[in-house]
Amino acid sequence: MLHVKELCLATDQLAKIIVDIASDKKATDILLLDIRGVSLIADYFVLCTGANSRQIQAIARAIDEQVAELGVPSPRREGEAETGWVLLDYGDVIVHIFSPAERDYYRLERLWSNAATVVYVQ
């Protein structure tokens, strides 16, 4: 698997770009967590909420398209907008796009409460 670190773009830069893209698509409760100190699976988690399946899909598509323009390989993708949870795995940066109900149900913020919050956008 090609990790972001192997590209010219630093992992933290990619994570912040993803936060900006999600914000531009009107995602809410955007949270960027630095999980390097608490997990080996990635460096950063980006969590955000879309109001409905159309918005979740729009956020995911925008992130995928705009990050691809930077030369980052396509992510592994899990879930569908209709289920209320889409995951985009860029290796070192993992993006979770939730519906409000799914975000409240899974509460990943609590699960990863030992991770450092880098950015929070309401």
Image: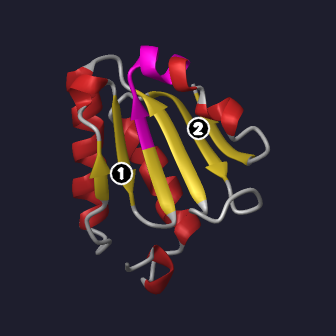
Give the answer, above or below, for where 67 lies relative to 85. Answer: below
Q: Quadrant of residue 113?
A: top right
> Given the image, on which type of amino acid does mark 2 rest?
Leu
Q: Is residue 71 left or right of residue 31?
A: left
- In the orientation shown, which residue stands out farthest toward the top? 101
> With 99 as the anchor, is 37 left or right in this view?
right
| Front position among marks 2 and 1 | 1
Label 2 sits on residue: 31
Q: Quadrant of residue 107?
A: top right
43 sits left or right of 47 in the view: right
The quarter of the rendered structure image containing the C terminus is: top right
In-front residue for pair 58/85? 85
Image position, residue 12 (x, y; %): 58, 64
User: With respect to residue 101, does 53 lie above or below?
Assistant: below
Residue drawn at x 58%, y 56% is 44
The span from disc 2 to disc 1 (Cα, nearest Å) is 15 Å
Give neighbour class at mark 1: few <14, some 14-19, many 20+ (Cα, 10 Å). many
Q: Secondary structure at mark 2?
A: strand
Q: Which residue is mark 1?
A: 88
| Position of residue 73 measured from the top left corner of the image (x, y, whole percent) | 28, 71
Highlighted magenta segment, given as a residue range? 96-104
